Image (cartoon, grey):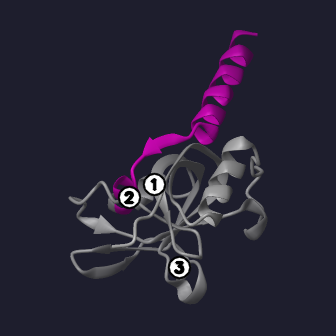
Amino acid sequence: MLVTLWVAIGQGLAQDLVLSPIKVTLCDLAEHPERYAGRMVVVRASEIGPEFGIEDFTNKACSSYTPVVVVFPDQVEPTPGFGLVRDEAFNKFFEEVRKGKHVEATYEGRFDVAYVWRDHKLIYVGSGKGYGKNYKYGARIVLHRLSDVVSHSVTNK
């Protein structure tokens, strides 16, 4: 009975480690991609470009870089085992993007990686050539949820 209880507790903890997202920066993901590959992560970033790329413009001291694209779970084969939460934050995010605003958000999802740039060299760290059109993204976040959406008007100079 006691052994069964410990096994159940151990399985529960292991499940929490797999499902509990890890709070990281895009720099963390690029510098230690093997640590986060296939794991659920939470990252703060800004939306850029028409392909739903993201960037962290606040961190200039990162020694590695990988362009990251965000994709929905139904765009991934095999399906990731979680769905996309289409709530108020999700709707606000896309409404603000459609208005042409600069949008920052917290992205929660699974991190997949193919390559990073380190010391001006392309280093393949995962399987595949990359993600997006012409494989221009070295990593992707398979989106589960958006939160903490903030938008700013874009000023033309």
Q: Position of residue 11 (x, y in %)?
A: 67, 30
Kindly indicate whether the residue at mark 1 contacts the one at mark 2 (C-beta within 8 angstroms). yes
State whether residue 153 is above or below residue 11.
below
Q: Quadrant of residue 57?
A: bottom left
Which quarter of the figure is the C terminus placed in? bottom left
Whether residue 88 appears in this view of the structure is yes
Residue at point 57% right, 77% down?
131
Give the CA separation, mark 2 to mark 1: 5 Å
Q: Position of residue 140 (x, y in %)?
A: 55, 66
Q: Which mark is residue 56?
A: 2
Q: Quadrant of residue 72?
A: bottom right
Give the CA separation, mark 2 to mark 3: 20 Å
Whether residue 77 appears in this view of the structure is no
- Residue of label 1: 45
Local packing at callout 2 (Cα closer than 10 Å; few below 14, some 14-19, many 20+) is: some
Q: Position of residue 9 (x, y in %)?
A: 66, 20
- Residue of label 3: 130
In the figure, is residue 4 to the left or right of 49? Answer: right
Check disc 3 and report its element: helix, strand or loop.
loop
In the figure, is residue 9 to the left or right of 83? Answer: left
Kindly indicate whether the residue at mark 3 contacts the one at mark 2 (C-beta within 8 angstroms). no
Q: Amino acid at mark 1?
A: Ala
State whether residue 16 is above or below residue 138.
above
Bounds of the magenta segment: 1-30
